[in-house]
Image (spheres, rainbow, N blue to C red):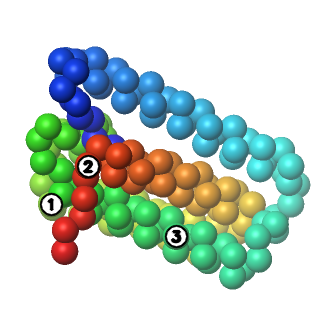
Amino acid sequence: MTPFHDSGQGRTQEQITAAVDVGFWIINVLMAVIFAALLVGVAQAQESPLTKEQSTWVYRGTLALMAVDALQTVSMKPPVYESNVLLGTHPSKAQVAAHFALFAGLLTLVHYRWENRVLADGLTIGVGIGEAWAVGHNYSLGVRIRF
């Protein structure tokens, strides 16, 4: 849930969207490379190199980053807009909550039900990296969470 923002440089929304799309592409490629490296290194293993406790902390950290991203999204004000194509540029609180609930639920199923721990932990780590990037990017654009 990363926003785009015109920092006063006179760029059009299309130019900003294109730049954000390039950023997403780069992050997705990096996540795929990390995930592939994890698979290649332990392709035959069913056990993750992470202990159960470490795996749980990675899962909890990823959920926390997802929650911060969702809160940042509902805190966005123009000229910052959401760029997640699943949500649209101005999602309602209900849309953001449903999006968060769906993806947090899927991550929870992966964490607790997927028998191949290597794949489950690799996917969780990949999502966590993407969420960390989104939260940092949102923050760099001035998106703050108010309680």
Q: Amino acid at mark 2?
A: Gly
Outermost residue on the bottom side: it is 53
Q: Is residue 71 above or below residue 92?
A: below
Quadrant containing the C terminus is bottom left
For image coordinates 39% across by 53% down, the residue present is: 135
Distance of label 1 from label 3 (alpha carbons): 23 Å
The image position of residue 2, as x and y in percent, is 33, 44
| Front position among marks 1 and 2 | 2
The image position of residue 76, as x and y in percent, is 18, 51
Q: Amino acid at mark 3?
A: Gly
Q: Amino acid at mark 1?
A: Lys
Which label sits on residue 142?
2
The image position of residue 144, as x and y in percent, is 25, 59
Q: Is residue 126 above or below residue 17?
A: below
For image coordinates 54% across by 30% down, the residue present is: 26
Say which label, 1 or 2, has the lower sequence index.
1
